[in-house]
Amino acid sequence: MNERKRNQPQRRHPPHRRNVGARQHQNGSAMSAQRNYERYLALARDATLNGDIVEAENFYQHAEHYFRVMRERAA
């Protein structure tokens, strides 16, 4: 398997877009944080209803992370 990897050409990743304005990027990120926060809260509630408290706690921790991101950006 190692020989196969050596013979394969290296793949290059496409360059990141850098022409996005800072304001546009912040708004997009803020919306993503809000969307992720709501998503993880919903997943946590579903896990709680299903009786899986470990999974629910994991999702609540993820939601808390995005809550802090939103709070930091609002300040």
Image (tube, rainbow, N blue to C red):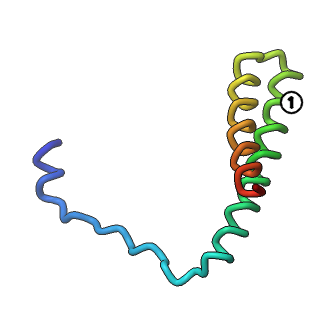
Note whether 13 is above or below 59 in the view shown. Answer: below
Note whether 52 is above or below 2 in the view shown. Answer: above
Name the residue rendered at 12%, 53% in the picture.
6
Coordinates of residue 31 in the picture (x, y in percent)? 76, 62
Name the residue rendered at 76%, 24% in the picture.
56
How dense is the environment of label 1, judged by Cα within 10 Å: few (below 14), some, or many (20 and up)? some
Residue 45: quarter of image = top right
Quarter containing the N terminus: top left
Name the residue rendered at 14%, 43% in the picture.
2
Coordinates of residue 68 in the picture (x, y in percent)? 72, 43
Q: Residue furthest right?
A: 49
Note whether 5 is above or below 16 in the view shown. Answer: above
Residue that mark 1 sits on: 45
Q: Nearer the viewer, residue 37 or 53?
A: 37
Q: Nearer the viewer, residue 51 or 35?
A: 35
Residue 57: quarter of image = top right
| 55 displayed left or right of 2 | right
| 31 displayed left or right of 50 | left
Secondary structure beneath dot 1 equals helix
Residue 63: quarter of image = top right
Name the residue rendered at 83%, 15% in the picture.
51
Note whether 41 is above or below 38 in the view shown. Answer: above
Give amino acid for label 1: Arg
Q: Residue furthest bottom?
A: 19
| 26 displayed left or right of 67 | left
